[in-house]
Every structure is written in C-alpha cells, then in structure tokens.
Amino acid sequence: MGSIIENELFSSSVIKDLHALDFDYVPAELPHRTEPLKKLAQMFKPLLTNIAQNAFIRGPVGTGKTALTKHFCQSLVQIARKQGTMIEYIHINCRKRSTDAMVLLGVLTHFDSRFPDRGFSVQEMLQVLRTHLQRKEAQLLLVLDEADALLKKSGSNLIYDLTRFNDETMKTSNPVSVIMISQKDVFTELDAAALSTFKRSNAVVLEKYARDELCDIVRQRVGLAFHANTVLGESVDLIADIASEFGDARFSIELLWKAGMYADEKHAKQVVPEHVRAAKAETYSVVTETKLKNLGKHQLLTLLSVAKRLQKDGTAYANTGEVEKTYAITCEEYNEETRAHTMFWNYLKDIEQAGFIQVKLSGKGQLGTSQRISLPDIPAEVLRSKLEGLLA
C-alpha cells in the first residue's frame, strides 16, 4: 500500500510551483491593472509626508481587488522606507473578523503576538495602537478586506475612530490610513460622520476582465507555475473562453490548477483541452452557485422543474409542456402560488438568458409550438440537489 502512495507522491508533475496557483499569491507584475495602480499611487502620495489618506476599492468577484491592494501596499512600504518613512501595513479580512474588537485585535497582534484576546475595550485598544505607533515612529496603513461584513455587523464606528485617529494629536504624529475593499458600494453603509472622512473621489472601481485579458493572466500563471511546454496554447484559450463569461480571474486560475491536477492524475505530459473540460465539469457548479443566488424564487422553481424532468426521464431534452406540469407540482411542494402560462414563459426566458438552459423548437411533425429544453453545462442531478438546498 505504501508503495502506491509513494509512487503517486513522487510521480512527475506538469506543475513546478503550486504556490503560484494559490488565490493568495501576488505576482510581481499585475496584467491589465496599471491604471488602478497609478491612481492608488497618486492618492497615497501624502503618506510620504506623513499625511493620512483613505480609499475604497470596489469590483465584482475575481477582478483582482485583493491582489492589486497587496501589490500596491507592499511596494509603497518599501519605497517609503527608502525615503526614511516607516509604514506598518496590515491586511485584515472582515469576513473572518467582523467586529470592531476583532479587527483591532488583529491589528494589535501584528505588533505584539501575545496581546490578550479579551479584557480591553475598543477605546483602550485604540490607545494601545497609538502607543505602538509612537514607539515605532511609524504610521499605519490598514486594509479592511470585505469591509461590508464589518459594516453590516458593527456599523461604522471603527471606521470613524480610525479615520479621526489623526485629529486627536498634532499632525506630526503617527497617522492611520484606511483602504476598504468590497464587492458592494460601502459608502451607503457609512454614517454621515464616517463618510465625511472618506472622499468619494478616492474610489477605485475595477471592471470584469475581458477574454483577452484573462488569456494574458492565465499565460502569466502558466509561466510561473508550470514546467516549460506542458500547457497547450489551446488549453489556455479554452480556459479564457470559459472564464470570460464571468470575467473572473480567480475562476480562470482555479480552472488552470484543476486542469493541471487532472493531467497529473492521468500521468499526461501536457495539459490538453480535455483536461480543461474535466476541470470545468468539476468547478462549474461552484460558479453557478453565485449565479443561482441572483435568480428569483419562481425562476429557481422553474429551473428545478427542468432538472427534475430531465432527471426523471433520463433524456437530453425536456418538453416545455411537461416542464410546466412539473412546475405546478413543484410550486405546490414549496407552498407557492403557481403563476400563469405567460409568466412561466418569462421565467424560462430569464433562466435561458442567464445561461442555465437552452430552449429550441421541436422537430417537424410536432403539434403546436412545443419547445425542447436542455441543460448544457451541469448534470440534472447536481443542479437539482443545489436548487433544493437553496430553496430549503
């Protein structure tokens, strides 16, 4: 048994550096993010003369918000140090630390790993932070990643305290600068007092990546993570095609990683499109999770009826009439009122537009204008269990 495990552990791999496929990995160059980097550099120029700045970075999943911020902050710290300015950079994920006290605890353990995790009020912790900064003769650059989670749970008191931190003593002190990152526009979550310390113009908005941009990102990661000539050009193209539907770099890197794992599993010398398709089949469902959550209740019920029908009949296509009957039964199961025929058609159109199903006219010789529905990208059984989970 040991030899089987040993053989697999030490078998040759197409991947030379798994680390470069990690979501937390920040490459030395960020493709297609030059403009936002320049904008951040202009905004944070005052830090070099000891004046605090605040900014907000927003964009959908996989647009490189965290990578951009880490890349910028790490560079800024190094450049400032050469100028004789000490900046302490701390990155906090507010999904993991969603209260004011937990955020400050994360900040204080950066300075003192033995700082006690209870027994201090927020105001006392801010005082301890001030002492640390004075002792180190440094200023703080604090990144609050997924800041909406903190604002939702704790409101904007901490943001206010941190951004007013600089007013309490003379300007020559140790200022605190805050960068908030979020998918949502967090300005709406800030109260008037906190908002007054954030300039709306200090926002960097990242757009989804275009197909060719994703291609460049995947190519870069291939160069960093894989042995030479182990990933076919058409595999890179296919990954970019698949991920371009979402404009999501994170998804494209995940596909590349999974495709590499499949190639290793098959002891293949190269990552070919078939490995990418296998990776897509495994990760696609993860991605649709977010897309499913964007659907309304009746669109979900309609999609569930399609999945049930296809699973029951074991066929490639379901007839719209049959699906509508299943929809009526499904509505009953979930105590929802069945909507009229026209509405049902609208729901079908919606889920087709969202890319979940394909609808086409039946072949000749069929009575009426019945249409056939197929699920192109996900097994009916997998979709059904996902939908039932969501609707529950």
Image: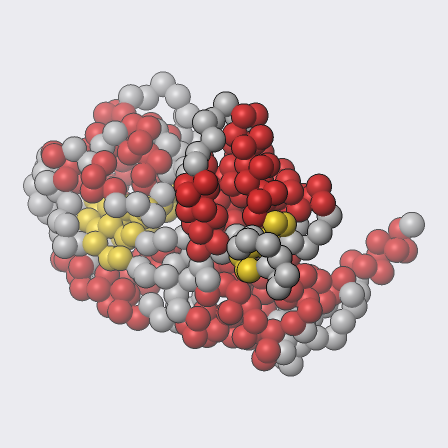
Q: Position of residue 73 (x, y in %)?
A: 32, 57
* Direction from residue 139 to residue 208 in the image, left or right: right
User: What residue sits 90% from the left and 55% below the top?
Assistant: 3
Q: Position of residue 112 (x, y in %)?
A: 39, 36
* Direction from residue 153 to residue 361 in the image, left or right: right
Q: Position of residue 241 (x, y in %)?
A: 51, 69
* Direction from residue 286 to residue 343 in the image, left or right: left
Q: How is the image coloured?
A: secondary structure
Q: Is residue 313 above or below residue 389?
A: below
User: What residue sits 41% from the left and 25% below the top?
Assistant: 116
Q: Nearer the viewer, residue 320 or 212?
A: 320
Q: Nearer the viewer, residue 256 or 68?
A: 256
User: What residue sits 22% from the left and 51% below the top?
Assistant: 55
* Direction from residue 150 to residue 341 in the image, left or right: right
Quadrant assignment, res 153: top left
Q: Position of residue 200 (x, y in %)?
A: 14, 50
Q: Nearer the viewer, residue 196 or 104?
A: 196
Q: Is residue 67 visible?
A: no
Most extreme residue toward the left, as rendered?
170
Q: Is residue 335 above or below residue 180?
A: above
User: What residue sits 44% from the left and 51% below the top?
Assistant: 349
Q: Nearer the viewer, residue 369 or 7?
A: 369
Q: Is residue 46 visible?
A: yes
Q: Is residue 339 above or below residue 366?
A: above
